Image: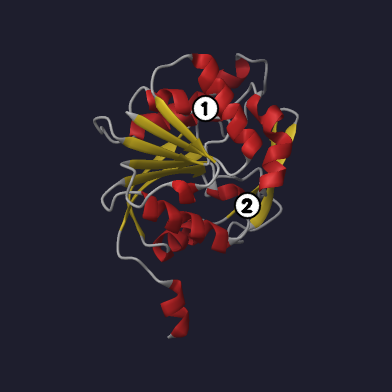
Amino acid sequence: MTVNDWNAIAASYAQIECDTRRQFLFPALLAALPAVSGGTVLDFGCGCGDLVIPLAKRFHRVIAHDPAPRMLERARRGWDESHCPGAVEFLVDTRDIPDAEVDVGLASLVFQTIEEPDRILAALEEIARILRPDAPLLIAMSHPCFQFETIAASRYGDNGSPIAVTLGELRFLDYHRPLSAWVALFATAGWVIRGLSEVYDEPSYYRNRGLQPSRFAGKLPLFLVVEMKIGQSVHRDEEQSK
C-alpha cells in the first residue's frame, strides 16, 4: 500500500463498523503498554487516530504520525471533536522529530501493509532513532501463523505474498510474511524481542451483529503483539560489504 492508496480510502477506513481491531486488538495493545508516568509516546502510522485519545489520557504528549495526509486529517479531526485534554502533535514526516525524543513507541497494523522489506527496515531504523535507547516499541500485526482463510492459495513460508483484506465494503492489500521473516527483519534493524502476546476474538461478537463467525473464532489468535527494545545495531551496508 502506498501513500496514495491510503489517501484514497481514508474516508471509508474511518467508518468501518464491524471491526475486530477496535474490539479486541486495541484494548490488548493499550493494556500491554508499559506503566510509564507521563512521558512522550509515538503512534507510528496512526491511521485515522483510533489510539490517539486513549494514549493522550496516559501520556503527557502524543506524537501521532501517518505519511498519508488524508488519514492524518481524519485523526486530527477526531481529536479536535473529542475536546479531550492533552498535548497531541500530528506529523506526516518523522524526520521532524529529534533523536531520542520518545519514551514509548507503538505501530499497530502498519508493517504488514508494506510490500518492500527495505521500506520496513527503514521504518524500524527511523523508530530506533526517535526512541530513547532503552524505550520499548510495541508492534501489532495480524497473526502471521493463523491466517488460514486468507493465505489458502499460497504457502505459509511464502515471504511477501499479497493478502486481499475485506472490511465491510472496503478492500485493500496486506502482505504475508512467516514469523521467521518478521524476526529476521526486526533483528536486522537492531531490535531485540522482549515479549509476545496473542489476541483472540469471541464468536459472540459476530453473532450479536448478525454475522456468522469464522470456525476459528475464539480458538486461534487473530493478532500478535511484539514488544521490543533496541539492541546491537546491525549496519546493512557493512554486512553487505563483507
Check disc 1: other Cα within 10 Å, few if <14, some if 14-19, many if 20+.
some
Q: Earlier in the sequence, mark 2 or mark 1?
A: 1
Check disc 2: other Cα within 10 Å, few if <14, some if 14-19, many if 20+.
many
> Would residue 60 be seen by someone viewing this image from the given angle?
yes
Residue type at the position of mark 2: Tyr
Q: Residue at x 61, y 45 (%)?
A: 148
Frontmost of labels 2 and 1 is 1
Q: Do the residues under discs 2 and 1 have CB atoms within 8 angstroms?
A: no
Q: Residue at x 64, y 21 (%)?
A: 17
Which image quarter is the C terminus in?
Answer: bottom left
Q: Residue at x 40, y 32 (%)?
A: 62
Q: Which residue corresponds to mark 2?
A: 175
Question: In the image, is 67 to the left or to the right of 2?
Answer: left
Q: Which residue corresponds to mark 1?
A: 50
C-alpha span from label 2 to label 1: 22 Å
For this rendering, which residue is in front, 14 or 38? 38
For this rendering, which residue is in front, 238 or 129? 129
